[in-house]
Image (tube, rainbow, N blue to C red):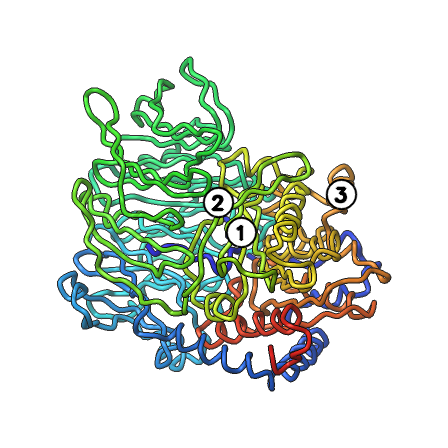
Amino acid sequence: MTKTKIAFRFLPAVLAVGGAGGAMGEEDPHLWLEDVTGEAALSWVKERSQKTVEAYAKDPFFSTSRDRFKAILDSDERIPYVSRIGDAYYNFWRDAEHPRGLWRRTTMAEYRTESPKWETVLDVDALAEEEGENWVYQYSLCRETDYRRCLVSLSRGGADANVVREFDMVDKAFVQDGFSLPEAKSVVAWAGDDRLLVATDFGPGSLTESGYARIIKEWQRGTPLADAKLVFEARVEDVGVGVSVDLGNEYRHELVTRAMDFWNSERYLRRDGELIRIDAPTSANVSVFRDRIYIRLTEDWEAGGANHPAGALLTGSLEAFLAGERELETLFSPTATTSLEGYTLTRNHVVLNILDDVRNRIEVLTPTEDGWQREPMSGVGAFESLGVGAVDRDQGDEFFLYVDGYLAPPSFAYGTIGSPPETLKAAPAFFDATGLKVSQHFAESADGTRIPYFQVGQEDNEPGPTLLYGYGGFEISMTPGYSPLSGTGWLERGGTFVMANIRGGGEYGPDWHRSALRENRPRAYEDFIAVAEDLIRRKVTTARELGVMGGSNGGLLTGNMLTMRPDLFGAIVSQVPLLDMQRYHLLLAGASWMAEYGDPDVPEDWAFMQHFSPYHNVQEDADYPPVLMTTSTRDDRVHPGHARKMTAKMAALGHDVTYYENTEGGHAGAADNTQQAFMSALAYAFLWRHLGPQDLGDEGS
């Protein structure tokens, strides 16, 4: 496990690729750009992208920042985060010599040294060259009974769709005639040494309307996949299915999930081939570990004679719950300012990661005869983020601790519950933070709601270029994090960075998220506008010097800032965005997000959705700020047609729009460090060109 960085946040993958048909049909003159790999569409992409490259090729800031970004991303001084598999500690590493990456391992004793010796397990660059594929490593799932065999997931060009192959950790080679799945958006789990639970594309009719698997089968080694035994079948209109298996302790659990929509799922325990329904609220997040069940609520729930609020974490005996008992213990209950960012289970403890006005604090809970004992875990500063992950929850109470902040380079520690953690690695400062400070402020939204935001910049600075970032969806919290690229590309040059904690996210729990769902989605945009206006009111910046950036759902946010308040911003960067909300549900994984946004085929839904569909709100006579649209041909989550069509429409109406499409990268936008450095340099060069001092021209950008 590694701590999620804050540079970009994208739509979650719920559990793969849809068609293009449409509500608008021939009325949309740019529909042809939805043909992802069509000759005409790719010719348009190549022409537009080449013009962008040419426009920035001689920009001194672009070239120098690209090279510096690449050096940072490849630096040996980065922390090589590890996870334990068996007795070894594994790391996936990319650098200049290994752009596709090395999967490698070491011992804890060796890892503690300044320059650990690593043993290469899988060289993805060598594999890609040998097979003539642009492989991107996704993940590995190792068999918990002996950790010798793992299922390795590889993606072509960074797409969500993956190829799964069985790998031998001793021989360091793929297993001949071992388990192997062709390219699909598969979900797999070990059900034994020679059995898998598999959800994948089994052929016509086996996928949902969202493009995810709807059928789970049990696959026995040595038999054709076509002969696998049916375990579960969801409906075509569902989002998809999922599987997970815990083989690491005496409590064997096989869990089957049916996602009816993005926020509601049924869960079943599979025992002796039979499925037992876990009768918790479908909107809750449910996990089982050893002899206990854990339920994190997203809606209020009355059970066992108690009223449990949304955002609470409950626990109880698994067997008693299955038998119908509903007297549960409360591990966390939210307040007006607190929410549960997450929790981690070790063998004997529950570790809570709590946000209080978007600031972390950690509590360790221990079951005793007198109830749950609570102790704080220290080690995080006022504006730093902290993450905790169990090293091996089945075996003990060891944990990894991840700490970083906007100006605090990350550190990585290791400890056991009850003892002070030992810092194993600490990254150096990758940018000059002299004179910079972090502060938190609150803006008042249109309905009077208090909206927090973080500001990073020079103390007592005059109004100047400011970059406002946001997401506002899917209950994802935007917490402080160290970003050396924004540090070098923006802060070092005197820019101010602002993170807006708008509704739709998870900063204040499920209610904060639900307050911007569907017909209430405009609340998120009003919050973002309120932060922008507060920055101008406080004289942090001016409208001409204020830029916004966002990716995926954040790209939808920036698209709406363009169409709703073009007067408020000097430049907009929209990355892998959703923009056409009338057809989003017909493209790739879009149908899986209808519980978040609405169903445009339902007239009552389209009545409110049309107002936050940027593609339908672009006007010819509007005065829009310059826009940079970026996407990826290999993004099989958010269709590149969104960015393509928006660009084509704006250009046809005479607006200033710059476009770049990376041929690889998937939904992350970049498949390796070189691509990431290029994409980041392009974004910051674009922002400086339009937000920086106007008398400097390209020379000052």
Badge 2: residue crowd in 10 Å (few <14, some 14–19, many ≥20): many
The answer to whether residue 216 is above or below residue 632 is: above
Q: Are marks 2 and 3 in contact (CB under 8 Å)?
A: no
- How many callouts does the rendering have? 3
Q: Quadrant of the C terminus?
A: bottom right
Left or right position of 485 against 387:
right
> What residue did someone put label 1 on?
212
Which amino acid is tagged 1?
Answer: Tyr
N-term-proximal mark, 3 vs 1 = 1
> Is 378 above or below relative to 539?
above
Residue placed under numbered mark 3 in the picture:
606
Residue 208 in picture, x, y percent from top left: 57, 48
Q: Residues within 10 Å of mark 1 (few under 14, many from 20)?
A: many
Direction right: furthest residue: 621
**Separation of residues labelled 1 and 2 (CA atoms):** 8 Å
- The nearer-to-camera label among 2 and 3 is 3
Residue at 53 percent of width and 36 percent of height: 264
Q: Give how far apart the Cα atoms at labels 3 and 1 are.
A: 25 Å
Q: Is residue 15 visible?
A: no
Is 127 or 459 nearer to us in this picture? 459
Kind of residue sitting beneath label 3: Trp
**Residue furthest to the left:** 109
| Quadrant in which the N terminus appears | bottom left
**Amino acid type at mark 2:** Val
Residue 311 visible in the picture? yes
Mark 3 is surrounded, within 10 Å at the Cα level, by few (under 14), some (14 to 19) or many (20 or more) other residues, namely some
Quadrant position of residue 344:
top left
Q: Earlier in the sequence, mark 2 or mark 3?
A: 2
Residue drawn 70% across and 65% down?
34
The answer for how far apart the CA atoms under marks 2 and 3 are is: 28 Å
- Residue position for label 2: 241
